[in-house]
Image (cartoon, helix red, strand yellow):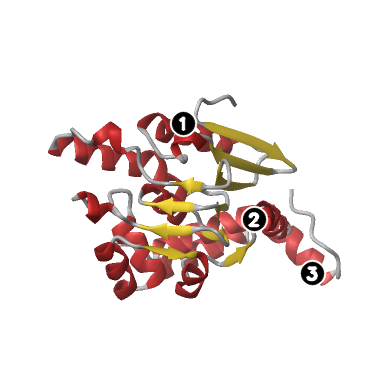
């Protein structure tokens, strides 16, 4: 896959997607959002890829926000369309992606950048990371799921404070809040992401996909997460991975999930 604003490296079932606009601190524009959708759609169908690591190029930024120059003159309808299409093509798409997505947050993750990181299934951060939703300082609000996912991750009060003050928090505070799972040095960020990815690869990606769907169901209006869990639990009994996993356990062997 060749892109103007992304770089995709695939190695041993792990795809690493780099947002690659370092001169713009990897800011999201419409072209980058479209390319992210195309990249993830391709990786979804790639049988040789089981896990995705999402990160930014360079040392300064994961994604420093949206490219403000693109939408500063937008109308009400254009603004609504910007949010709706972005959520459909990328942010909700990644949140409901059937393969695990780990965000490796290097440097600034602001506005749409933090929203992108929050759409991943979990996050790790380098110790130079700074995270925040500064939209209210621009006279707008988060439009790519920030008002929904941030409270789920850090609680309503902390989310309200971050959104209202438009301030940034450092990586350790983000870890204390539950926004990121691990903090490490910039040099060790991708190695840690790969280590976690390889731990995941020991397990059934088919089962993990069903678990992702069940966990996400809890946060959807009108959906009974327990019912989704029950259904997906039952379906697992009909899979080859279930047979492999249980037989390996009973025979005291390591399972070999394809």
Give the answer, above or below, for where 35 lies relative to 217: above
Q: Could you say which quadrant of the image residue 220 lies in?
A: bottom left
Label 2: element kind: helix
In-front residue for pair 245/99: 99
Q: Is residue 74 left or right of residue 44?
A: left
Residue 249, numbered label: 3
How far across and down, in percent of the image, does residue 120 sit? 49, 53
Residue 81, numbered label: none
Tell me if label 1 and label 3 are in contact, CB under 8 Å.
no
Specify which label sits upstream in the sequence, 2 or 1: 1
- Closest to the camera, between mark 3 and mark 2, is 2
Task: Inspect this view and state whether residue 133 appears.
Answer: yes
Residue 35, numbered label: 1
How far across and down, in percent of the image, does residue 228 sit? 44, 63
Q: Is residue 29 left or right of residue 163?
A: right
The residue at 37%/34% (across/down) is: 29
The residue at 61%/58% (across/down) is: 207
Tell me if label 2 and label 1 are in contact, CB under 8 Å.
no
The residue at 42%/70% (across/down) is: 226
Instruction: Estimate the spatial distance between the alpha carbons at disc 3 and disc 2, rounded to whole Å.
Output: 33 Å
Label 3: element kind: helix
Reading the image, the residue beneath label 2 is 189
In-front residue for pair 46/137: 137
Q: Could you say which quadrant of the image residue 80 lies in?
A: top left
Q: Residues within 10 Å of mark 1 (few under 14, many from 20)?
A: many
The residue at 29%/32% (across/down) is: 70
How far across and down, in percent of the image, does residue 127 sit? 57, 62
């Amino acid at each position: 896959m060749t892109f103007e604003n992304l770089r995709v490296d695939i190695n041993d079932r792990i795809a690493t997607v780099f947002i690659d606009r370092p001169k713009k601190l990897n800011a999201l524009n419409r072209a980058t959002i479209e390319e992210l959708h195309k990249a993830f759609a391709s990786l979804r169908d790639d049988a040789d890829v089981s896990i995705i690591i999402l990160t930014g190029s360079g040392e300064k930024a994961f994604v420093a926000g949206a490219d403000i120059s693109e939408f500063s003159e937008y109308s009400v309808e254009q603004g609504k369309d910007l949010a709706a299409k972005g959520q459909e093509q990328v942010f909700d798409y990644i949140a409901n992606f059937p393969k695990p997505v780990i965000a490796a947050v290097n440097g600034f993750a602001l506005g749409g950048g933090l929203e992108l990181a929050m759409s991943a299934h979990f996050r790790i951060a380098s110790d130079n990371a700074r995270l925040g939703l500064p939209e209210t300082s621009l006279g707008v609000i988060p439009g790519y799921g920030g008002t929904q996912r941030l409270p789920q991750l850090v609680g309503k009060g902390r989310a309200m404070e971050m959104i209202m003050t438009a301030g940034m928090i450092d990586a350790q505070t983000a870890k204390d809040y539950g926004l990121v799972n691990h903090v490490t040095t910039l040099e060790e960020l991708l190695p840690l992401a790969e280590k976690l990815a390889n731990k995941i690869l020991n397990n059934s990606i088919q089962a993990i996909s069903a678990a992702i769907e069940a966990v996400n169901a809890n946060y959807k209006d009108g959906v009974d997460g327990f019912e989704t869990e029950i259904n997906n639990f039952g379906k697992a009994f009909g899979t080859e991975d279930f047979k492999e996993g249980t037989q390996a356990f009973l025979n005291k062997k390591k399972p070999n999930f394809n």
